[in-house]
Every structure is written in C-alpha cells, then in structure tokens.
C-alpha cells in the first residue's frame, strides 16, 4: 500500500484512496511489546523472521525496527530471551536496523539508569548479546511514573535520563515521551 505502484493490488488501492504517489516508506516496525505480558512468549522471534524475510525479499532496503524490549530494572542488561535482535527462544540474533525499547520506572530508578547506553557499543556487551554489533535504539516510550502522578521529581528524573540519551546520540536515534498524549482526565 505504501510503496507500490498502480500495477500492484495495494498500490492501486492507495491510488484509488486518493494518494497517487507512493509514500516512500523507509522504516517499518515489526511487533510491539510481545513479551510484555508473557516474557516466555516463544513465537515472536519466529514470526519476526517470517515477516522480515518476506519484507526484505520484496523491499531489501526497508529499515526494520524490531520491537525490542520493555525494560525492567531487573533486566537492564537485556538478558531476557525471545527478542529478535538479540536472539533467544532457540533462534540466533536476527537482522534489524534498530530496536524499539520502552522504559517505565519510578523517578529514582529512571534517574539511576541515565547511563543505560554508555557502554552499549562495547564489543564485549554487544558480542554477548548478539554475537556482533548492537543495533541502534529507538526509545519510543519512556516515562518516570510514581503510581499515576507526574510531578517535579518525575520531570527532573526524566531530564536526567534524557541527558544520558543525548550523551549517547550515536546509539539512541529517537526518543518519545510516552504520556505525551495521555488523557489526564480519565
């Protein structure tokens, strides 16, 4: 739909929908928090492999963003299994341009992991996880949440955390504050 021309079924559908020019889709995320509710979910890396295989067969230049992790302080070294970019669930690490991490912590915990990406490119760290280089990071959800309130303590801890991300901008390519569009009125 996004990149096909009039000779393709979905490209024709896009044109019929009023968008005659292809969108030029360059990045595609596959997945979103698959292991959040079931950390032992064994199916996602296999599904990722099937989906990306088909995508790259047709569009070899598409940059795939893999659903990476919903980071918990207990797993700050990303040792949990079943994540495509770092392998697990019986599969080796798989090709991805970057991965999408989600980090929600208390203000104290979030400020304490401001250096999360300081050693991310360290060959020993990346080799342990992937057998090679670690992919870039899109930190597309983060927030300091102390129950359901956001206050000055949360704001300061988020600022400290972002300073760490800015310091590591060669790794962290994008960030997005998760509650940006939340409805605070219920």
Image (cartoon, rainbow, N blue to C red):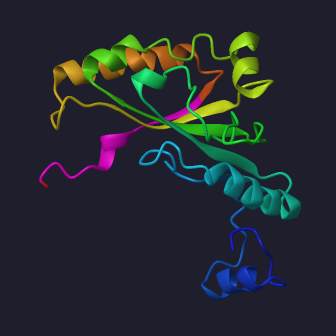
Confirm whether the magenta stretch covers residue 49.
no
Question: Residue 95 occupies which quadrant of the picture?
Answer: top right
Question: Residue 36 occupies which quadrant of the picture?
Answer: top left
Query: Where is 172 relative to 61, above or below?
Result: above
Q: Quick one: which residue is furthest to the left in this view?
A: 185
Query: Where is 41 relative to 150, above or below?
Result: below
Q: In which quarter of the image is the N terminus?
A: bottom right
User: Residue 107, how many percent across, how many down?
Assistant: 27, 20
Q: Which of 154 and 7 is in front in this view?
A: 154
Residue shown at 81%/82% (left/top)?
8
Query: Where is 70 relative to 76, above or below?
Result: below
User: Residue 116, how many percent across, how many down?
Assistant: 51, 16
Query: Is any atom of residue 97 visible in this view?
Result: yes
Confirm whether the magenta stretch covers residue 178.
yes
User: Residue 60, how many percent across, how many down?
Assistant: 86, 54
Left of 91 or right of it: where is 156?
left
Residue shown at 65%/45% (left/top)?
65
């Amino acid at each position: 739909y996004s990149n096909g021309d009039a000779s393709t079924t979905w490209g024709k559908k896009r044109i019929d929908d009023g968008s005659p020019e292809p969108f030029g889709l360059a990045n595609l995320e596959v997945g979103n928090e698959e292991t959040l509710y079931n950390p032992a979910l064994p199916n996602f890396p296999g599904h990722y492999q099937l989906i990306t295989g088909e995508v790259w067969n047709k569009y070899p230049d598409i940059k795939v963003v893999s659903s990476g992790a919903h980071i918990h302080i207990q797993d700050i070294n990303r040792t949990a299994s079943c994540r495509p970019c770092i392998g697990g669930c019986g599969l080796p690490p798989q090709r991805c341009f970057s991965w999408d991490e989600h980090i929600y912590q208390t203000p104290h915990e979030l400020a304490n992991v401001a250096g999360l990406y300081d050693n991310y490119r360290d060959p020993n760290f990346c080799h342990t996880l992937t057998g090679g280089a670690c992919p870039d990071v899109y930190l597309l959800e983060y927030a300091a949440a102390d129950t359901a309130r956001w206050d000055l303590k949360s704001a300061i801890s988020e600022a400290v955390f972002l300073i760490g991300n800015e310091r590591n901008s060669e790794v962290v390519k994008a960030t997005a504050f998760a509650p940006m569009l939340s409805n605070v009125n219920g």
